[in-house]
Amino acid sequence: MSNVVVVGAQWGDEGKGRLVDWLAGEADIVARYNGGHNAGHTLVVDGKTYKLALLPSGLVRGKCGVIGNGVALDPEALLAEIARMEQLGLTVTPDNLAIAANATLVLPIHRAVDLAQEKLRREPIGTTLRGIGPAYEDKVGRRGLRVCDLAEPDLLAKKLDALLDYRNAWFKGLGLDGFSRDSMLPMLRDIAPRVLRFVRPVWAYLNEASDEGKKILFEGSQAVMLDVDWGSYPYVTSSSTIASAAATGTGLGASRLGHVLGVTKAYATRVGEGPFPTELQNEIGAMLRDRGREFGVNTGRPRRCGWLDGAQLRQSVKVSGIDSLALTKLDVLDGLDFIDICVGYEINGQRTDFLPASLAAQSRAKPVYERFMGWSQPVKGQKRFSDLPREARDFVKRVEVIAGAPLSLITTGPERNDTIVLHDPFEI
Ligand code: GDP
Ligand code: IMO
Ligand code: MG
């Protein structure tokens, strides 16, 4: 029996949420460990769509959800999302949601900093403007507020004053309005009991559950190419998004994480700025955006689209320790005459099979493609590998070789059951 960590292997939005929902059928607990409500995870179950940002996707299956210490938690966004999910028929109580006492808080001041920083940048990152980056800055700057501080009114006021001293100096220097303690403290004191009811020592809960043989599913947000170390820095998010973050972000030790399932689309997308070697700024890119409905879950921004970058995927497999891959949205390629996969790059006339760290080199990387025949029979909605057209099976088999990891799941539509199972990640 093992746990499973689900991680994005590209630039995010690979379909992690829908796979977590599928796998949650077998899990006891679903835990978020990084990011915040910059994430947008979509589940479609019997025609009903759930868009989750902070809440673990396993709640839709009635499983226990955990928000780990690695998450940047905006308490207002959390309560609003709980209200939204309750309208869709879910109930969220302390029996099915546990929040780590040591998770970092995202406050209105962080949203204001995010917006001001983006306006100031000569080359904006295209963040989600949710305040996630500035909240993580305060965490590592050792002046952040944490969930447990909500239970200590005097300490909360003192820590807030210190944070405002620091941040308001920055606002003042730019001639911008700062924040006052009086505008923030009443909101925090009002919200405190509604958040504190969910608080538990998550690390102990997960360790005990694991000792009892329960299955834990870790739900990653973002993806390897948005990782603060491994992504196309500085066009990244501000947290560690690779599988090992599931340990630091929950308190279950690295040796107990289990199988790492990387999720990749059958093509590639990116939302926000930054290098994207296989981007297609042509009618094929527009077709992928249209057929794949490639628009941000939270911000509605159009996603940039391109061919699958197999060289980047191979790199993700290594740095994130991916044991097997789930290939999503194969149906979006239905009807194409041909499909390309990038197998390496040419940079300054030199062939290389990985993306170097330098942003300048990444921006200059020209993809080297391998071309595949498209298929005429649709794969949409197919549930068995043997029912896929031969060209689609050839494509999928080649992805395994190029990526250097076996495929365990393939999805052929957004519905929960539009899923082909090659190997069950909980059983590998
Ligand atoms: P996540 O952030 O990784 O959870 O992914 P998102 O939810 O942001 O984006 C994935 C989008 O693709 C959602 O709109 C899903 O409903 C949709 N989707 C997921 N899997 C498939 C699939 O196999 N086929 C199609 N057509 N859509 C899919
Ligand atoms: P899920 O979990 C896709 C991108 C933003 C921006 C960069 C930094 O749904 O895959 P941030 O607000 O985090 O400081 O933005 O990261 N980004 C995502 N792109 N999917 C996500 O999450 C993302 N979360 C952040 O667009 O380029
Ligand atoms: Mg998403």
Image: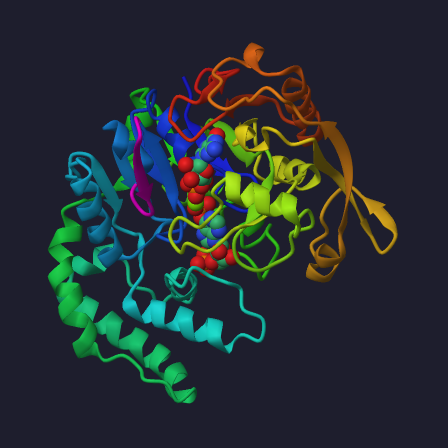
Quadrant in which the N terminus is drawn: top left
Give percent across and percent down for residue 26: 34, 20
Q: Nearer the viewer, residue 272 or 170?
A: 272
Q: Is residue 166 left or right of residue 315?
A: left
Which residue is drawn at the image coordinates 35% and 29% (left, top)? 21
Q: Nearer the viewer, residue 344 or 148?
A: 344
Give percent across and percent down for residue 362: 71, 55
Q: Say if the magenta span includes residue 3.
A: no
Question: Quick check: can you spot residue 220?
Answer: no
Give percent across and percent down for residue 216: 35, 28
Which residue is drawn at the image coordinates 18% and 45% (left, top)? 198
Question: Quick check: can you spot residue 418?
Answer: yes
Which residue is drawn at the image coordinates 55% and 12% (left, top)? 387
**Coloring scheme used:** rainbow
User: In the image, is residue 128 above or below residue 307?
Assistant: below
Which residue is drawn at the image coordinates 25% and 76% (left, top)? 161
Q: Nearer the viewer, residue 372 or 6?
A: 372
Q: Which residues are magenta?
A: 46-55
Give the image quarter of residue 193.
Answer: bottom left
Q: Nearer the viewer, residue 402 or 367?
A: 367
Q: Residue furthest top?
A: 386
Ligand 1 shown in quarter: top left
Q: Say if the magenta span includes residue 47.
A: yes
